[in-house]
Amino acid sequence: MKTLIVLALAGLGAQLVDGSLGMGYGVTSTTLLLALGTNPAAASATVHLAEIGTNLASGVSHWRFGNVDWGVVAKIGVPGAVGAFVGATVLSNLSTEVAAPVMQLILLALGLYLLARFTLRGIDKRHLGKPMRKRFLAPLGLAAGFVDATGGGGWGPVSTPAILASGRLEPRKTIGSIDTSEFLVSVAASLGFLLALGDQGIDVGWVAALLVGGLVAAPIAAWLVRYVPPRLLGAGVGGIIVLTNAKSLLTSDWIDAGDPVRYTVYAVVYLVWAAAVTWSYREYRKDRAQESADALSAEAARLAEAEGAAAPNGVAPVEESVRSGRPSAPRD
């Protein structure tokens, strides 16, 4: 019972992250299942079965809040489903001794990517509104779907940053579209695992616990995506994933590092993580300040144009007052 409660809470937390950041449910949940000693293929299968329900609920919630671009969903979701089915088949045919470290390495790499991506880069808005082409989305979906099934997560960490980096789709619609298209990926991956594994190693109770937690969080996350700073959340979640999978790898039979090595690595990870979160928060504050300044300038220009008059030096009175901090002189 204790394990089921932990899994339900993990599903709730993972869906809050995934629904508001566009990534994290699979990576976070699979990391927990591996820490509990689950077979890698069974862990990925369990997570993907739960994601069928959570992604459906998340997609409906994002649609209701206007966060979905259905063209993007179709162009990336179908290739993603193909890649996920192939990835599930590949993982199911790997031995546990090979699959466990491979999955942990994939999860570690995804965690590092999350940490670096959201710490060092903001959102590019120069190409906002331009169409997303199929020749970009189709191979992206194929690769992301394959990584998602073999790594127990990765659809969001691979596809969401790539679309954000293009600057063609606003962040909330990127997150909503990726979350919605992940339903197709989850169905295809689950089908691949069930055909290859049957129900071997899949605990229905664990699937239900993850699902219940995710269903509770889905509508909350779809609302939060409008308010949660992505940089701060991405850096925080990335650090958790890096630390957890680094511990699993260092204590595994594959590496079996000694105490001095392990504690040194842990200390470095904690320091880098703390620095990343601090930096992300500072950059978030800078971005907010710049957005406020831009909004103020735009409002001043709008008011000056509406008044239809300018000071003798060619500067509108309202704009002059904004720059100097003094109220503009009344006109006769």
Image (tube, rainbow, N blue to C red):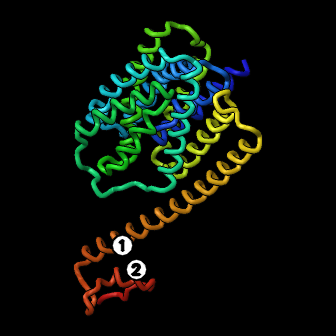
User: Which comes sooner in the sequence, label 1 or label 2?
Assistant: 1
> Which residue is the site of mark 1?
297
> Which residue ends up furthest to the right in the rendered image?
259
Identify which amino acid the numbered label 2 is placed on.
Val
Relative to 169, 112 lies left or right: right
Q: Nearer the viewer, residue 277 or 200?
A: 200
Is 203 displayed left or right of 222 in the figure?
A: right
- Which residue matches tag 2? 322
Q: Position of residue 56 (x, y in %)?
A: 43, 25
Residue 75 higher or lower than 46, as above or below: below
Q: Residue at x 29, y 85 (%)?
A: 315
- Give 99 or 227, whichever is nearer the viewer: 99
Contact (Cβ within 8 Å) of mark 1 with mark 2: yes
Badge 2: residue crowd in 10 Å (few <14, some 14–19, many ≥20):
some
- Of residues 132 and 318, the one drawn nearer to the viewer in this rendering: 132
Q: Quadrant of the N terminus?
A: top right
Spatial CA distance of label 1 from label 2 is: 8 Å
Return the x and y of residue 22 as percentages of the image width and height: 45, 39
For the point 45% across and 24% down, the residue is: 149
Q: Quadrant of the C terminus?
A: bottom left
User: Badge 1: few (under 14), some or many (20 or more) residues near its Cα, within 10 Å?
Assistant: some
